[in-house]
Each structure stands twice: as structure tokens, then as C-alpha cells.
Amino acid sequence: MTESTPSRRRGDDLEHAIFEATLEELAEVGYANLRMESIAARARAGKASLYKRWPSRAHLVRAAVRHRGATSEMLFEPTGAVRADLERVMHRIAEVQAGPDGEAVRGYVGELTASSDGEELRDDIERPRVRIVTAIFEAGIKAGAVRPEALTPRIANLAPSLMTHYFLTRGEPAPPEVIDEILDLVVMPLITETGR
Amino acid sequence: MTESTPSRRRGDDLEHAIFEATLEELAEVGYANLRMESIAARARAGKASLYKRWPSRAHLVRAAVRHRGATSEMLFEPTGAVRADLERVMHRIAEVQAGPDGEAVRGYVGELTASSDGEELRDDIERPRVRIVTAIFEAGIKAGAVRPEALTPRIANLAPSLMTHYFLTRGEPAPPEVIDEILDLVVMPLITETGR
DNA sequence: ACCATTAGTGAACGCAACGTTCACTATCTA
DNA sequence: TAGATAGTGAACGTTGCGTTCACTAATGGT
């Protein structure tokens, strides 16, 4: 062993352990029941170490989610089959929502105010989704299956927005039938050239 | 005076005062900072009177919102000008979101779980909106401006859903430009017969 | 190889709000 | 007019907050 398991961690090492603990707690008890004391206990850290780094639960959660986001970037290669690609992305969103990220978003929304700066986390979550959907649209346009005017952020964000809306207002991710309905009644008719 | 302003209210009288106080507090401090003690104080009631009626803050808020909802039903008579009608309804939704109802929804979402029964409040809010949009669509169909297949709950709920999504994720109601964009890029293209 | 510095621990603290209880009192009803 | 019913307000124990402090483990410069 090169690092001889030191009994007291510091710096990034400790920070990482706290993030892990936060995400686990989040997944287990949900944002509303998240306790700083539980996180500290699970990470085998002092509460003071948490408050030294982040001023509030909200900040800690945001940092933990961003950390995780930086680690596992959402990758997606469009196949050209627009509907199938969108469906896959939406299912992937549903999976993420079922985990700690979903809980984080819910809690975040609960504490949000017009003044409080929610842009950071929102952009972290929205941007990659818009990017992927845009890529899918572009592939579809190239194949002549998608009309070029559909290539706007608002429309690219439509499917993800409806996923988020469902999740927030129902408490659980949209099931497959709902995803199908969103695609067949809303998204596909809107972006396809013919096909009504 | 027939009722001689009794110094101690009971029954519906008291209940009504508590609802008033709840909605006022909600509008002033927001759901996250809502305190049972403040509500009781504002209503000049004992905390015990609150807990005798509702088991939790969430229940009280829900009841208060339903009470208000029952009082001021959202009325709307379609003029036949589909886009203008939708725009008016969306502006009306934005106004409501800026008040206590918006705060209630935000708080509600924050505490929601897959298990917890959110149907009640959600339906109270969703149903009247779908009803109104449906009426607008029907008028549009009659005028030949809207294609009949657009008449489904999912599509009727689209504009309201996007309003709610914006409100929840940004912390404030959608501004007029966003409403315009939603209408011009998403809703109108989807429901109109021609118009691409 | 040592020791000053830095960083983390864990217990304790005061505080605020929770949700409950209880003795008291105002209002209603028979 | 005498119960019975319903509300008040203060007090209570509890929980989690965010902070502080004496102590201790790791680190890095010389």
C-alpha cells in the first residue's frame, strides 16, 4: 500500500467522500428529509467540515450533483432514427430522475425564488439535454425526416421539459406510455415535415 | 349587530380566518419560510387549532388553496380567436403563479414523493386549465382554424404544462416573450391545420 | 527527522420551529 | 342557566440548525 489508509482524510479526498455520502442520502431519504448530520455521519466527517465548504444544504447538494455530472457526462450518438433516438434519451432522463439527481432537482425547485440564482444547476442539467436533442434533430434534418425550422432551443427543450414537468408534478418519472404519447402527439408531429 | 363580533371565533368562521392568514403568509414569505406559528399568530388563533384540523403544513396549505380555488373559479369564454385566447389564458396563469397559489405549488412539489398523494391538488389546478384550453380548441375547430385531432388532454395541457415548467425551474412566471415563443413555435404549429 | 502549520473531529452550545399537552375560558345548545 | 363543545396561550420535550472550541492527525519546509 502506498497510501496506508490514513485515518483522517483531508482536501479533495474528504470532499469526494462527502459528495458520495450526500448523493447516497439523497437517493435514500429524498431532499425533504436530508439532514446535514446524517450526511456528516455517513461520510464519517464533522459537521464543521461541511459548513466550512458550503454555506447551506442547497449549496452542498448543488455541488454534489455538479460533481457527479462532471464525472458521468451524458453521451449519445444519434443513429438517424429520430423517434427511436428521442425515445432512448427520454428513457435515460427518466432513469436519472429516479436517482439522486431527481431528488436534488425536486429540492432545488422547492427552495427556488425569483431572486435566488438557480441558473447554475439548471444550466448544468438543461444544456447537455438540449445539446443531445439538437444533435438528433440535425441528423434528422440531414436525413430529410425533420424540418429545419424545428432546430431551435425551445423545441429542442420540449421533450426534456415535459419529462421534467411530469416528474415534478407527479413525484415520479414519466412511464413509457407517457413518453410514447409525448412523442407521438407532440414532438414528432411538430418536427416532422409530413407525418400528421 | 346580530352577531356582536364575538371575541372568540369557532367552526367555519375560524377556519376561514386561518385560510386567509395562510394565503397571506404564503404570498409574503413563500412556502419555504412558512411557519405554523406565524400563521396562527396572524389568524389570532392557537397552534392547537391548526393541528386539530390539519396534520401538517402541507395539508393546511393544500386546504387553503382548494378553499380559494372553490371561491374564485377561473372563468373564460372563448372568443374564437385561438391564439389570442390562449395568450390570455397563459397570462392569467402567470398572474396566479405570482401569488400564493404559485408558492403553494412550489412547496408542494418540493415535498412530493412517488408515494405521497399529490393528485388532489394537481387535479384542482390542472383540470380547470385543460377544460378552458379544450373549450378554446373546440371553438377553433368549429371555425376551421384548429385540426380536430389536436383535441386531446395531452395537447390541451401543453401550454399550461410549459407555463408550470418555466415557473418551477426559473422561480418566476414566464414573461410575455416566452409566452409568445411557446405559442408561435410550439402550440400554434401543432394545432393549426395549415400554417407551416 | 523534526516541528510549526494546516485541516479535520466530535462534543457542546444556543436557537428556532416542530407538534403536543393542559388548565383555563368563551360560546353554543338544550 | 347548566352542561357540553371548541378555542386559547403558555409550556413542554424534541429535532435539526449552524457555530464554536479544545484536541489531534496529516503535511511540508528546513
Image: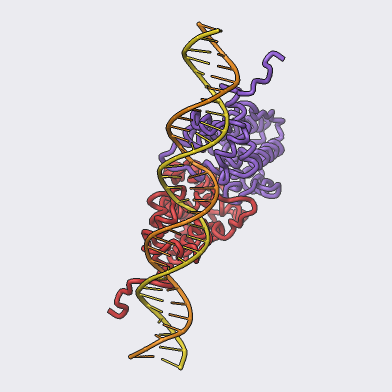
Chain colours: A red, B purple, C orange, D yellow
Query: Considering depth in this image, is B104 or C2 the residue closer to the camera?
Result: C2
Residue B94 picture quarter:
top right
Q: Nearer the viewer, residue B15 or B146?
A: B15
In-front residue for pair B132/A32: A32
| Residue beneath the point at 42% across and 44% down | A175
Q: Vertical placement of B182 versus B65: above or below?
A: below
Residue B191 visible, this orientation: no
Q: Is residue B68 left or right of residue C5?
A: right
The residue that appears at 43% across and 38% down in the rendered structure is B116
Q: Can the viewer see residue B63 in this picture?
A: yes
Q: Position of residue C7 (x, y in %)?
A: 45, 73
Instruction: Choose top left, top right, bottom left or bottom right for residue B104.
Output: top right
Q: Is A173 placed above or below A24 here?
A: above
Q: Please give left or right for residue B166 compared with residue A177 in the image.
A: right
Does B166 sit left or right of A48 as displayed?
A: right
Image coords of residue A181 (percent x, y): 48, 42
Q: Position of residue B174 (x, y in %)?
A: 65, 47
Q: Picture coordinates of residue B134 (x, y %)?
A: 60, 32
Quadrant location of the N terminus of chain B? Answer: top right
